[in-house]
Image (cartoon, rainbow, N blue to C red):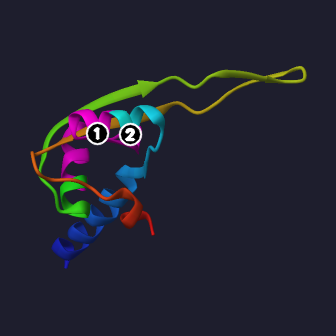
Amino acid sequence: MTNSNNQQNNSHRLFQIIQSPVISEKSTYVAEKNNQYVFKVARDANKFEIKQALEDIFQVEVTAVNVVNRKGKQKRFGKYNGRRDHQRFAYISLKAGQNIDIEAEIK
């Protein structure tokens, strides 16, 4: 019984790691030029977890994972200072000939 709970928790964790694809000018340029895709990921996720999650969710073979941490911007609203959340992005390189159709996966 604990084994099935672990598998269920692991699959639930995989969907928590990958938060959303990043669709921007830079990400589309990187996708066309280097066959890389950009995803916003959980801040506590490591490269191995990100790779496992993408391979299980999208059924592709990942060759490399590069991670970027972006600090949140300082913002001010009237006299109150605040900060936007920090973000973590993963640049995923796929094996040659494979791709992820992000538009189809979102719908």
- Tag of residue 28: 2
Whether pointer 2 and pointer 1 mark residues with C-beta atoms closer than 8 Å, the reply is: yes
Bounds of the magenta span?
30-53
Q: How far across and how far down the image is residue 83, in percent?
A: 67, 26
Q: Which residue is mark 1?
A: 32
Does dot 1 land on a helix, a strand or a loop? helix
Q: In the image, what residue type sits under mark 1?
A: Glu
In the image, is residue 19 part of the stretch drawn in magenta? no
Q: Nearer the viewer, residue 49 or 57?
A: 57
Q: How far across and how far down the image is residue 103, in percent?
A: 41, 60
Query: Can residue 85 be seen in the rendering of this structure?
Result: yes
- Tag of residue 105: none
Q: Nearer the viewer, residue 48 or 105?
A: 105
Q: Is residue 64 above or below residue 78?
A: below
> Left or right: where does residue 87 sit relative to residue 100?
right
In the image, is residue 50 part of the stretch drawn in magenta? yes
Q: How far across and how far down the image is residue 21, in percent?
A: 41, 49
Quadrant location of the N terminus?
bottom left
